[in-house]
Amino acid sequence: MVIHIVRPGDTVYGLALEYGVPMSQLVEDNGISGSYQLTQGQALVVQFPRQVHTVRAGETLSSVARQYGVTTRQLFRNNPILAGSPTLYPGQTLVISYQGEKEGTLSVNGYAYPHIDQELLRSSVPYLTYLTPFTYGFTPQGTLVDLDDGALLAAARAGGAAPLMHLSTLTEDGGFSNDLAHAALNDLRMQEILIENVVRMMEEKGYQGLDIDFEYVFPEDAVPYAQFIRRLNQRLNPLGWPVIAALAPKISADQQGLLYQGHDYDAIGAAADRVLLMTYEWGYTYGPPMAVAPLPNVRQVVKYALTEIPAEKIYLGVPTYGYDWPLPFVQGETRAQSISPQTAVYRARKYGAVIQYSQSAQSPWFRYADETGREHEVWFEDARSIRAKLALIPEYGLYGVGYWNLMRRFPQNWRVLNALYDIRDASQGG
C-alpha cells in the first residue's frame, strides 16, 4: 500500500495507469464520487493485489475461501465491492491477498447508533472484532432504558463480529448525568438491580461483553466507580463476558477537571478486562479550530496510561470524522459542524481549496470561503492521519483500536487498517 497525495493535473485514470491498478479499485478504496474529480492535496490509498481469483459458475464465497485457506471475513475485507454481501457472479475478480507485510495483529471495536445506514453497517462489520450499539441508559431505580438494537445485533451475527452491550449515563437530553452516576455508584441496592438487569439483557439479546461509559463522574465517586466496574467484572467474567471501560484522555493522575477526576486509571485498569482511551475531541463543536485527535496529544495520553495500565489491556480511541468551523472563531458563540472525511474532501473541491497536512498534528486541514464570502477552517481525518494513529498500537504494544464511530462513510480507514494489520476475532480473545 502507498498513500498518494494528489498533484495538480492528476486524474483517477492517469493514477490507475501510473500505479498499474484498476481504476475501479481506486474509486472504491477512496470513496471517489461519480464525477471522478480529485482535489489537490487529497490523500489516496493505492493497493497492489498479490493474488486474485476469477469467479466460476457455482462458486460461493465460502468455497473460494476454502480453496485459498482464508476466511470469508478476510475476503470481505479484501473486496469492499462486495459491501458485506456473499453474492458472487461468474467472471467477477476477487482479491485473495495484497502485496505488503502486516505490521501486527489487533482487536477492533466500532460504535454505532441504531439508525446507521444498513449497507454501511454490513460493509463495516467484517473489519470488527466487536460491534457496540450505542447506548443503554438506566433510570434512578436501576431499570434499563431499552435500545432498538435488533438490526445491529443481526448484522454483527451475520458478519462475524461479537456484540458488546454499551452502558452509559447518557440521558434523553443528550448529556451524561453525573447525578445518575452518583446514585448508581453509592446506592448498593440500586446497583445490584442494575447489574442484574444488565445480565438479563445480555442473556436475552446475545451480547458477548459489556462496554461501560460513565463520563463526568464526580471526583468523590472515583473510588466507587472503580469498585462498580470490579463488581461488574466479577459478575460477568464467570459467564464468559469481558468488561471494557472507557477512560477520559488524561495525561496525569491528578489532572483537574470534571471530565478527568472521576476516572482513576490505576483502579479502573485493574478492575476492567480492557479499557478504551477516548483520545479524540481536542478539536470539538464549541472549541477553536484544531485537529480532532492531534498525534502529540494522543501520544501523551498513551504514555501516561502505560504508567498505570498494562499495554495489553488498552484500546486506542480513533475518530472517523472532522469539523468545519466558521471564522472568525468566537468563544461561546461559534459552533463547528461535524462532518465526514468524504464531506470534507468534497467541500475542498467545491470551493477550490488545497488540502494541507499538518506534520505536527498529523492531520489534514484547509480553509475556504463559502457562497457568502465567510471563511471556514476544516480539520478532518484521512489515510495519512489514520496510519499515524494506528502506528501507535505496535509501537506501544497496545491491544486494539476503538472507532468513534461507524456512522459516516470513511473507506480509506478500512483500507489502511486491512493493509497493515490482521484483525482478531472475538473467539481469539477479542
Image (cartoon, grey):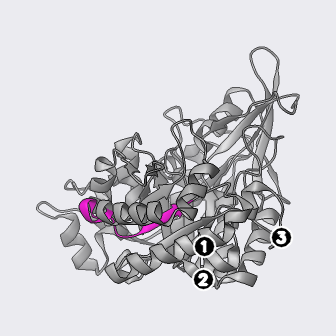
In the image, 70: left or right of 12?
Answer: left
Instruction: State if disc 2 and disc 1 touch (CB < 8 Å).
Output: yes
Where does residue 396 sit, x and y in percent of width and height? 69, 82
Question: Residue visible at 85% across and 28% down?
Answer: 327
User: Magenta residues, as a range?
Assistant: 202-213
Image disc number at residue 226: 1
Q: Which residue is identified by label 2? A: 270
- Which mark sits nearer the N-terminus, 2 or 3? 3
Would you identify the image quadrant in which residue 220 lies? bottom right
- Which mark sits nearer the N-terminus, 1 or 2? 1
Q: Nearer the viewer, residue 224 or 67?
A: 224
Kindly report the distance in space between the C-alpha atoms of the residues bearing marks 1 and 2: 9 Å
Q: Which residue is identified by label 3? A: 254
Image disc number at residue 400: none
> Measured along the vertical axis of the image, is residue 66 above or below residue 134?
below
Inspect the magenta stretch and tell me whether residue 381 lies in it.
no
Question: Residue visible at 70% across and 66% down?
Answer: 388
Residue 222 appears in view:
yes
Viewport quadrant of the N terminus: bottom right
